Amino acid sequence: MKLSKLSKRNKIIIIAAIILIPVIFFGIQFIGRTTTSSSDVTYGTATVEKGTITTAVTGSGSLAASSTYEVKSLANAEIESIQVSEGDTVVPGDILAVLNSDSAKLALDKAQLAYDQAVVAKANIEKQMSSLTIVSTASGIITKSNISLYQNIQKGTSAVEITDDSTMEGKVYFASLSLLNQFTSGQAVSGTTASGKSLGATITDIDPSDNSAVLKINNSSGVFKNGTSEIITISGGELTYTSLQPCAIEYLNSPISVVAKAEGEISKINYTAGNRVSNGAAIALINGDSLKTSLANQTLTVKEAALNLKNAKKTVESLNIAAEQGGTVSAIALAAGDIAAGSIMTITNYDKLNVVISVDELDLDKIKAGQEADITSDVYSDQSYTGIIKGIALEGVAQNGVSTFDVTIELADKGELKAGMTANIDIIIQKSENILKIPVDAIQKDDKGYFVYKTSQTDSVTADVLAQSKTYIKTGISDDAYTEVTSGLAQGDVVIYEQVAASTNTRFPGMGSTDRQSTPPDGASAGKASSGQNTGN
C-alpha cells in the first residue's frame, strides 16, 4: 500500500514538472526581452545647427515648345510657291508661301464697287433726311402752293412758288407824245398815288406807239400788291405828270419754284399761298419715318459691303502668306500646285519652353499663377533654371481615388535645354533661412507636445537618463529630413535618438510607451507631393 501511494505522488510531480518547465522557459525569455536594450537599440546624436529649410511641391515632365501655330490661308487658292524649308528660322512678316492671285483680285474689285455704291446710296438718304424741311429759296410772296397737310410729296416735286415782290412794274400813259418826251429811259422819278402811297421808280422803257412809259417801282416796303391799279403822279426834276388813267401794278419778277428734296408725307405747313416769306424760312415739314427705315437698312448694307471688302482685301493680302510669329519651320504639309486648304505648315517657337507637371489636389491651394519654380535637368545637373507658373488646369484627372491637376510652367531662360528633355520641378512653398534645425527622426511626441532627449550620452541609456534629458520644444516648418526648432533648444545643443537595428518593440524599464512623430511638426507640409531641401550654414 505504501509503495503504491509513492508511485502516485511521483506521477503527480512528474506531470507538474512537464507543465511548469515550458512556462518557466517562456517567462525567462519574456523577462529577457523586457529588460534587455543594449543588444537591439543603439543611439545616434544630432547637433542643433543653423541652416535653411525649404518646402516645395515637386514634379517632373518633358520640356515642350511654349507656342506652336498652324499656318493657314484665308483664300482657297492654288499655291504658287513655298518660300521656306523645314528647319528654317523665320521672324514675323517673313513670306512663307505665295498663292495664285487672279480670282482674288477680281473679287476685290467687285467688293470695292459694291461698297462705293452702298456708301453713295446711304449719303443720298442722309441728304434727304436733312432735307425733310421744305425751305424757301427766296424772299417774297407765296403765289402758289401745291401741298396740303398729310399729302404725300415726291422728291423733286414743286411744293410752292415764291415771287419776289421787292420790285413791281407799272405802265403810265401820257396824253401826248410831247409830254412823254419830257421823260427819258433810265430816268429816276418819284411820285405818289391817288390813294396816298409814295413811290420811287426808274423809267425802264419809253413806248411812243402808245405814249407810255414803263416804271420799275421799288416795293421793299410791300405796300403795292400785284394787280392793283393806281392813278400815279410822277416827278422828274422840275417835270411833274399825273396819269390820265389808272396804272396797273404787277410783279416784275418771275415766280421761283421751291421743290421738295425728300419724299414723304407733309406733316406740317407753316406758310401757305399769299403769305410773305423770307429766304430760308421753313415752309413745311415732311414726315421722315420711311426715310429712317431706309437709312437703317442702307446702313446695314454699307456695313455688310465694308465687311466683304475687308475680307476681300485680306484675301489678296493673304496671297503672300507671312509669318505671324517668329520661330522654326517644324513641318511643311503642302507643296506648290496644292490647294491651300487646311494647314500649310507649322511654326514652332523653341526659344520659349514649358513643362507640364501633375500636382496632387491636396497641394493645389499652395500654388498660384505667377509663382516661381526651380528647374533642374539630369542632362545639365550643374545648372539650375527659373520658371513661372503660367496656368493651372481648371479640371483635374481622377485615378485610384486621387485627383491631380496639370500645372504649366514656362522657363524664363531655357539656356542649353531642348524640347523633349526631362525637367525636374520644385515649386517653392516655404523657405526659412538662418534658423535652428534638427533631424526629423530626433523629435517625438506625447500628450504634452513635441520633445527631444537633450544629452550626448549614447552608452548605457537608462530610463532615468531619458527622463532627465527629456526636453519639450516648439517647431516650425519641416521637410523630409529636418525640422525647424523655434524654442527649447540652442545652437550647439546635442540630442540623441533611437537607431533601431533589429526590433522596433523595445521598451525601457519603467518607461511608458511613446509614439514616434507620425505627422509633420507644426507648420510642416505633408504628403508625397511635398518634399524639401535643407542646407546648413
Image: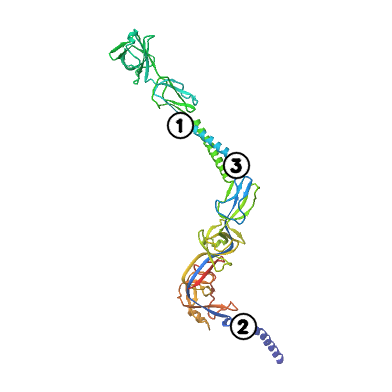
Asked if the residue at tag 2 contacts the one at tag 3, i.e. Cβ–Cβ closer than 8 Å, the answer is: no
Q: Which one is closest to the eye, mark 1 or mark 3?
A: 3
Tag 1 residue: 130
- The residues bearing labels 3 and 2 have C-alpha atoms spaced at a distance of 101 Å
Q: Where is residue 97 in the image (x, y as percent from the top left)?
A: 60, 49
Q: Position of residue 248 (x, y in %)?
A: 37, 13
Q: Which mark is residue 29?
A: 2
Which residue appears farthest toward the bottom when viewing the image?
Answer: 2
Which is nearer the N-term, disc 1 or disc 3? Answer: 3
Which residue appears farthest toward the left when viewing the image?
Answer: 238
**Amino acid tagged 1:** Ser
Q: Where is residue 202 in the image (x, y as percent from the top left)?
A: 34, 17
In the displayed structure, would residue 444 be above or below residue 59?
A: below
> Which residue sits at x=50%, y=59%?
370
Tag 3 residue: 104
**Amino acid tagged 3:** Ala
> Which residue sits at x=54%, y=67%?
383
**Amino acid tagged 2:** Gln
Element marked by disc 2? helix
Report whether 515 appears left or right of 256. Answer: right
Q: Quadrant of residue 5?
A: bottom right
- Give neighbour class at mark 3: few <14, some 14-19, many 20+ (Cα, 10 Å): many
From the viewer's side, name the closer residue of 140 and 447. Answer: 140
Q: Which one is closest to the eye, mark 2 or mark 1?
A: 1
Q: In which quarter of the image is residue 378?
A: bottom right
In this picture the colour scheme is rainbow
Dividing the image into 4 quarters, which one contains the N terminus?
A: bottom right
Can the viewer see residue 14 in this picture? Answer: yes
- The residues bearing labels 2 and 1 have C-alpha atoms spaced at a distance of 117 Å
